[in-house]
Image (spheres, rainbow, N blue to C red):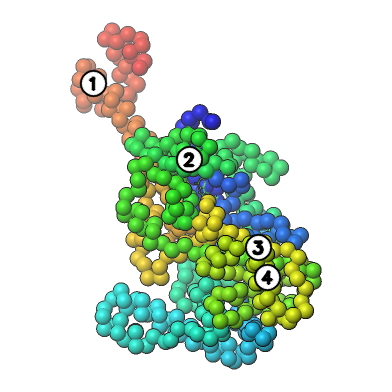
Amino acid sequence: MDSTSRSSVIIIGAGVSGISAGKILAENGIEDILILEASDRIGGRVRNEKFGGVSVELGAGWIAGVGGKESNPVWELASKSGLRTCFSDYTNARYNIYDRSGKIIPSGVAADSYKKAVESAIANLKNLEATNSNIGEVIKAATELPSSPKTPLELAIDFILHDFEMAEVEPISTYVDFGEREFLVADERGYAHLLYKMAEEFLSTSDGKILDNRLKLNKVVRELQHSRNGVTVKTEDGCVYEANYVILSASIGVLQSDLISFKPPLPKWKTEAIEKCDVMVYTKIFLKFPCKFWPCSPEKEFFIYAHERRGYYTFWQHMENAYPGSNILVVTLTNGESKRVEAQPDEETLKEAMEVLQDMFGPDIPNATDILVPRWWNNRFQRGSYSNYPIISDNQLVNSIRAPVGGIFFTGEHTSERFNGYVHGGYLAGIDTGKAVVEKIRKDNERNNSETQNFLLEPLLALTLTQTEAMSSLHKCDIPKQLYLSGKLGIPEAIL
Ligand SMILES: Cc1cc2nc3c(=O)[nH]c(=O)nc-3n(C[C@H](O)[C@H](O)[C@H](O)COP(=O)(O)OP(=O)(O)OC[C@H]3O[C@@H](n4cnc5c(N)ncnc54)[C@H](O)[C@@H]3O)c2cc1C
């Protein structure tokens, strides 16, 4: 067990927001920090693993929002590090929709259905806005509301629109500000290489490893005790750490769980805000095959399966653009389907995925030789993939989630008003929180200095000088010296 040590700041979590916050602290001369990370590596939801001979991204895969009027800072980091990426063009996906008999739905039919789905989503959005305004608008919007999707094609398009392409319907800052292009990270060093490069700027490293003992891995924080004197942090292995401030970067899912307890408990306005934010579960399942049996041209990269159950193995991607010859397919599930699949053995998931592929490509396709099913929902250090704020919500909700409580500052993608849910959201949130803590420390120092000044000046001035004289001619260190020289204090008292 570590003996209790005190730092200026403890950062909980070494995902992108924790690392960017640490970098800001270091740049501002705050070096006595400690980073406590629950898992065995840095990166959090940016995580790659070797699968089928290549590096696949289990969490964030794309740098989303590139080519717009503002530059995406994560794209800048990627360019600086020479991270290998490839452009993803989803637009063809909607004309690559397979029905259960393996036929591709004619593009005109798919386009019509897509147009209707967009109109329906816009009407829904108006309806929601109206609910927040006046009753007349509500009635008008309700009468214009189209029926909900029913056929496999409608359900598949609804899934694509709402789980992948919300930018088409409601303005999302990522695409409006940073641009509409998305690039898939396809680099053997992984997306996490960007985090390592950031960490390298303020933590000591060697041979690609972080050796700095200010980063402690496998430290699961279970309790935060906060008071005017600072924050006491207790970890699952019985260690106790103390700090003036804590930056807590655990995900919204973790905040909603009971992994970390707060003493005293968080105020009601805080816990209510945390509960109101939805958690999205998004799962990429990787399948390795002995050979390819799907169309491999670049414009066939994304394809869709239309099934009567919404979200049932709907969205597929081949990895030939990213890693030619890898023979890997990825299928994405969300929310209920993700949770269902997380709860069952991988063999069952493999069987289901193979049946779907046989529907699309016929019964003679080879079996997958390997499967990888990440479990973001059941991971107690994540409890989901990313935050999802209600479509119509004011910025009060995110402000409450972000607001500090005592010496605990909250950061992470879920605290980013413009970019929640994205890597750049986490990155920018960490920078903002780092700066807020630097500012707080600066103010504390100023206050402490002036208190020390007053503490020294006031009683002594009463003994010896008038206030005006003190202000006009003396530095605070001169007063003990004068008292000593005048024989009113001995050496020890004068120095203290
Ligand atoms: C499957 C998936 C796909 C995604 N796709 C994309 C994408 O394509 N593009 C994109 O931009 N974004 C994507 N995202 C979102 C993106 O990954 C996140 O927004 C971002 O990485 C969040 O960073 P963070 O620092 O806020 O949180 P995290 O990365 O979660 O960091 C928090 C850290 O805190 C640690 N922690 C938690 N609890 C404790 C505790 N009690 N004690 C100590 N440590 C603790 C965790 O282990 C973690 O390392 C995706 C996410 C997932 C899961």
| Residue 27 visible from this viewpoint | no
Amino acid at pointer 1:
Pro
Ligand 1 image position (quadrant)? bottom right
Q: Are marks 2 and 3 in contact (CB under 8 Å)?
A: no
Mark 2, secondary structure of its residue: strand
Give the residue drawn at x 35%, y 10%. Answer: 491
Q: Position of residue 324 (x, y in %)?
A: 76, 68
Tell me which numbered mark, 3 or 4, is placed earlier along the sequence: 3
Specify the label residue 10 is tagged with.
Answer: 2
Residue 357: quarter of image: bottom right
Specify the label residue 346 is tagged with.
Answer: 3
C-alpha span from label 4 to label 1: 82 Å
Tell me which numbered mark, 1 or 2, is placed earlier along the sequence: 2
| Depth order, front residue of 283/326 | 283
Which of the two marks, 2 or 4, is nearer to us in this view?
4
Mark 1, secondary structure of its residue: helix
Residue 393: quarter of image: bottom left
